Image (cartoon, grey):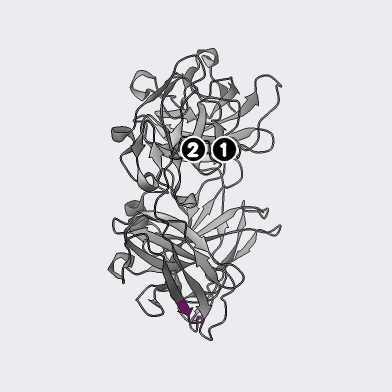
Amino acid sequence: MFLNIPTARQKYPCPGEACDWENRAPLLTVAGTPIVIDNTLELGHTISGVIKDEGDSPTGDGYVIIWDSTGYRMFNIDNDGSGNYESPILGDGTYYAAAWGEDWGRVTQLWENESCPSALCDITAVGTPIDISGSNITGIDFNIVAQMPASISGHILDSGGNPNPGGAVQILDAGGNGYGDFWVDENGYFETYPLADGTYFARTRHTWQTIDEVWDGIDGSHCPNLECDILASTPIVITGGINITDIDFWLDQITSGGTISGTITDGVIPLSGVNVQIFNANYEYLSDYFTDESGLYQTELMADGNFFVRTWREPLGMAREFWDDIPCQPNCENRDWVLANADLVPLNGGDASGINFVLAEPPGYAISGRVTDQAAGHGMSGVYIILFDANGTWFADTVTNMDGDYSFAGLSADYQRRLHPLCRGCTGRIYPGVV
């Protein structure tokens, strides 16, 4: 049985990511009874402006990033090719914005007129707040100036010098900040976007049945399953805007390893479309897979090692688990908890089959509901829902299904729920307490 909230008309606005948690009563679970929430989304307002070059002329280069008042990155917004941009609909609140330019050989500019290369500055300390209060905000313009272009490029090759079938090179700076994964083309070639002068490190990822490597100044050193300290590898130094080329990794085939496979059911029926994620023994993400119509999943060939296996995006109301039958909410993203409590799946010269999951509604309480388009009256699919605890700390997230329904299960008492919809034309809301 589900309990409809008696105070549903008392919803509080949750503008973007700027909810005031201290002044909002928590959503309380009631005597072990799941709670159903039906939510409607209402119109908000936008931030808009023009991206310009150093000569104050509009440019098609760059895109705009929006952060909430806490510095949480919310959106990337493309311009229309002539520099004009407009944000998705936002609720009243405080935001920060920057125009990213590094992909085009320009320097990111934080509003208002602050240089912020690669958006790595302290956004809320350096940026000027943009306050929305009942109306659209216009004239948030940027000037992204050209920098001396410098990129890192090279190849991912197999041991015979042929292009490796797939893979990417990950770039980090000396502070461990990631600059993204740069995927190879059909020739095994990769090239980063223009980077500022500085020290960088590189390693391969997502390569096919080969041993990943870190850059060693020659042709790469083994880094199986990414279990090595990339910041202890050979640095790549950019100075004076001079491109760095010939960062060529020669990968060896995996000679000792295997695959991980299993089935996922609800105890009776196979569950298709369940996301299965693989992590190394340091709880770093490696890859993910989906179950087929028989509930079966199987990884690609991986090098010997120990791995965490976790389900994700489970069917409505199912518990999120690590193998072997270890529910993880609310600690699924807590590395220390995972290392102390979750079981590892070993690979040692052979396959690991039978890594099965039986998903069920977990013990405890549940919150579920539907997200509805207020104007059209129908459910909205693909809306991103975030659940926070009573301190405003991230607890879990999910996405509405085709009918607009969502569910969080396995909850203890005293949780607060915030809705942050990633859709155009809508703004989030939170609910007051229920007793």
Residue 294's place in the image compared with 45, above or below, is: below
Return the disc, 1 or 2, that comes first in the chain's sequence. 2
Percent of width and height locating residue 409: 51, 38
Quadrant of the rendered structure where residue 284 is? bottom left
Q: Does the stretch in magenta take in 75?
A: no
In what element is the residue under mark 1? loop
Mark 2 is surrounded, within 10 Å at the Cα level, by few (under 14), some (14 to 19) or many (20 or more) other residues, namely many
Q: Rate crowding at label 1 as few (under 14), some (14 to 19) or many (20 or more) other CA atoms within 10 Å.
A: many
Helix, strand or loop at label 2? It is: strand
**What residue lies at 45% left-to-right and 76% top-to-bottom?**
249
Which residue corresponds to the image point at 62% horizontal and 28% vertical from the top-left? 370
Query: What residue is pinned by disc 2?
Result: 64
Front residue of this view, candidates 62 and 382: 62
Quarter holding residue 198: bottom left
Quadrant containing the N terminus in the rendered view = top right
Query: Which stretch did the figure color magenta?
Result: 249-254
Amino acid type for the residue under numbered disc 1: Asn
Q: Are marks 1 and 2 in contact (CB under 8 Å)?
A: yes
Residue type (three-letter) at the residue carrying disc 2: Val
Percent from the top left, x then y, of residue 292? 68, 59
Q: Nearer the viewer, residue 59 or 184?
A: 59
Is 405 in front, or is 424? 424
Q: Is residue 264 above or below residue 57?
A: below
Image location of residue 357, percent across then percent down: 55, 57
Q: Which residue is mark 1?
A: 79
